[in-house]
Image (cartoon, grey):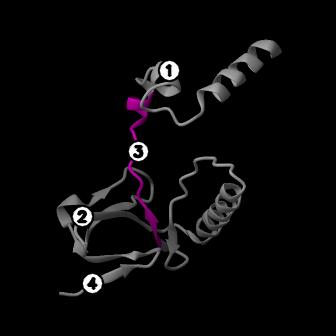
Amino acid sequence: MFSLLIVHSPQIQVTGIIPERATLFKSALEPCRLTFKAAMGGEYVAIFKHGDDLRQDQLIIQIITLMDRLLRRENLDLRLTPYKVLATSSKHGFVQFIESHAVADVCTISPFDVIYGKYCKYNWYAVCFSLYSLILLA
């Protein structure tokens, strides 16, 4: 059995693609979501884009990742999740797929859950301070 390294995530080795999990996104260039079998078990999902130059995307994501690391060293965590991008040519490339919530699901989340509950990503004191500042400015 052979295995390949995912170039933009070299710690992950894949042994194949799960064809029944491949899907095309509804957009002009129809990027393809590919699910790979990981050598250590599990799956790795990436998006293959054809007809899109990802070289600038790759550079910008690298800059954002560097800035995130520098800010974290100074104890300023902006909770960024920069995804990985690998331009394989001027017309092709891979983008790491990050699971997220659908927009419709996000719209149904109550503000209480966002500020205090399971979706809370921020210090609620900071949120309250921001709201208080907006009230003072009004």
Mark 2 or mark 1: which comes first in sequence? 2
Residue bounds of the magenta highlight: 93-106
Residue position for label 2: 42
Mark 1 or mark 4: which comes first in sequence? 4
Cα distance between the residues tagged 3 and 2: 18 Å
Cα distance between the residues tagged 2 and 4: 14 Å
> What amino acid is at disc 3?
Ser
> What amino acid is at disc 2?
Gly
Mark 1 or mark 3: which is in front? 1
Query: How many neighbours does mark 2 have within 10 angstroms: few (below 14), some (14-19), or many (20 or more)?
Result: few
> What amino acid is at disc 1?
Pro
Outermost residue toward the right in this view? 137
* Of residues 44 and 58, the one drawn nearer to the viewer in this rendering: 44
Name the element at disc 2: loop
Cα distance between the residues tagged 4 and 3: 28 Å
Q: Are marks 4 and 3 in contact (CB under 8 Å)?
A: no
Question: Residue 76, relative to residue 35: is it above or below?
Answer: above
Q: Are marks 1 and 4 in contact (CB under 8 Å)?
A: no
Residue position for label 4: 3
Mark 2 or mark 4: which comes first in sequence? 4
Cα distance between the residues tagged 2 and 1: 34 Å
Question: Residue 70, relative to residue 126: is it above or below?
Answer: below
Seen at 47% across and 74% down, the residue is 8
Residue position for label 3: 100
| Residue 111: assigned label | 1
Query: How many neighbours does mark 4 have within 10 angstroms: few (below 14), some (14-19), or many (20 or more)?
Result: few
